[in-house]
Amino acid sequence: MILLRSADPAPGAARAVAVFGIGLIGSAVVAALEAGSPMHRTALPLSWDEGAHRAGEMAEIERGIAAALGGPRDGYAGGLGGRLAFVWSAGKAGFSAREEETAGELESFRAVLGVAEGLASANPELEVAFCLVSSAGGLFEGQRAVGQFSRASPRRPYGRLKLRQEELLFGARAPMARRVYRLASVYGHIATGHRRGLIPTLLRDGIRREVSTITGRMDTLRDFVWVEDVAGYVARDARHARADETVLLASTRPSSVYEIRTLVERVLGRRIYVTYSTDASNAEDVTFSSAAVPDGWRATDLESRVREIHRRAVGGGAAFERAGGRRSA
């Protein structure tokens, strides 16, 4: 995890943000926070699978947070003040994860939530927010025009994991702001160690003139949202949010797999090589109503971002790295 603390906070207004999970979304949130104001960064380990290691690591994280807020190195000592935000964007389990893969991640989430509750309860002058990155696709798979009153109905272990995390967060009794972000399909730059979805995979394979295998149909509808739009929204919440809220962050402009393929070919200036898997497990539509997104949310143009990904991938060489992130198309 990454612990950020304000470089020069006003007296009595110490601020710290603990970001758990620094993959595609978490790393973008860290960058957005650092762009907003000068902050000092500390990296602290946290094991997702080893419970014995996790306990000691959580104790060290508590001490680090207390120190970042200007208090003694005892996470539950009273007297801490200012603002502290937890951002949970962690997890190795993907959309197609099995039940046993999600179980360990739920326990890690419980441990981190417990730290947040303990700090909030023991420090009345400390303003605590917990920001949970959830999954609109996992919760509403197979539903169209998802809106404010649509009911979450996860079909996979991954979706059930995200719903359970939401339930645990809103069931917490400690005085803190609870924020949940249900994200559409997030895409970003091609980067080593980051999970790649449909758009970065088609671009990378197209640049390299390799074949992409797509799970789904050409007419399968998805909603794609730019990672930096998401990160900017979450970073603002981490700094300022004080009330409980669950929000949907989506473009609300669905695109079919065929449309994405055509867009990538237009950006590349040539055809790409694609095969379609016979596995129909990822062929369901997921689309969202424009009335369901929050005020203040803006999703940027898909084509301009795809062109930006292409420019950076070619100019920076990311498209040609052999040891890359996890593929998922």
Image (cartoon, grey):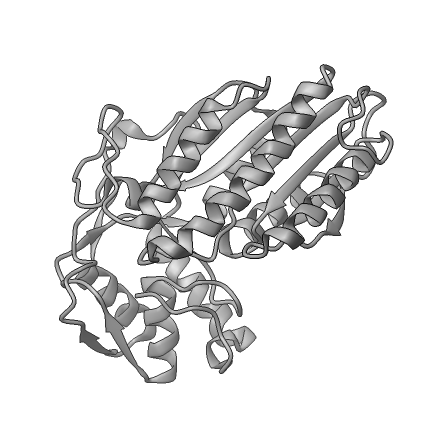
Query: Where is residue 93, by image quadrant?
Result: bottom left
Image location of residue 275, percent across then percent down: 19, 77
Residue positioned 27% across, 49% down in the render:
156
Residue 290 placement: quadrant: top left
Which residue lies most toward the top here?
124
Q: Position of residue 38 (x, y in %)?
A: 76, 42
Say whether residue 46 is visible: no
Question: Horizontal and vertical percent for residue 48?
Answer: 56, 54
State the residue in front, 8 or 87.
Answer: 87
User: 171 left or right of 141?
Assistant: right
Question: How many marks do you count on the picture?
Answer: 0
Q: Is residue 300 above or below residue 207?
A: above
User: Height in image: 164 above or below 27?
Assistant: above
Locate the C terminus by quadrant: bottom left
Judged left or right of residue 171, residue 177 is: right
Q: Estimate the x, y position of residue 171 in percent, counting from the top left.
A: 46, 23
254 or 194, nearer to the observer: 194
Task: Classify residue 3 as left or right of residue 167.
Answer: right
Write the residue at 50% across / 68% down.
Answer: 312
Residue 270 visible in rendering: yes
